[in-house]
Amino acid sequence: MIDMQAQLEKLRQDAAECALIRDLATDPKKRELFARLAEHLSVLASEVERANGESTGSEIAPDLPPVAPRQPLAFPQSRS
């Protein structure tokens, strides 16, 4: 539980740092990259927070829609 809380804080901190870099970036491609990173890390933090709430039996953010299960990546078969 403590490890999950530490990971949640780390994700939030990383998202904030990416947002700051996005705001300071002058190159449009780098700005877009750090915007995507900030958004992705924010979503991950929300998912960890939701999972943490489910494991403790409390709902932290009941207004969030359920997250659909992810499909495994399909890699092409190598021809040997």
Image: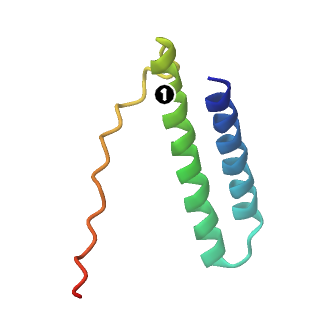
Rendered residue at 52%/19% (across/down): 60
Q: Mark 1 points at which residue?
A: 50
Amino acid carrying mark 1 in the image: Arg
Corner quadrant of residue 72: bottom left
Q: Eyeballing the image, is 80 above or below 25?
A: below
Residue 52 is left or right of residue 19, and the answer is left
Looking at the picture, how far across and down is residue 47, in whole percent?
49, 36
Give the structural element (helix, strand or loop) at label 1: helix
Looking at the picture, how far across and down is residue 41, in whole percent?
58, 49
Looking at the picture, how far across and down is residue 12, in whole percent?
67, 41
Q: Report the quarter where the N terminus lies.
A: top right
Looking at the picture, how far across and down is residue 34, in whole percent?
63, 64
Q: How many labels does the image show?
A: 1
Q: Report the quarter where the C terminus lies.
A: bottom left
Rendered residue at 51%/20% (across/down): 53
Rendered residue at 69%/79% (across/down): 27
Rendered residue at 69%/57% (across/down): 18
Residue 48 is left or right of residue 10, and the answer is left
Query: 51 or 79: which is nearer to us?
Result: 79
Near mark 1 (Cα within 10 A), the count class, few <14, some 14-19 or many ≥20, is: some
Q: Which colour scheme is used?
A: rainbow
Query: 2 or 15: which is nearer to us?
Result: 2
Residue 41 is left or right of residue 64, and the answer is right
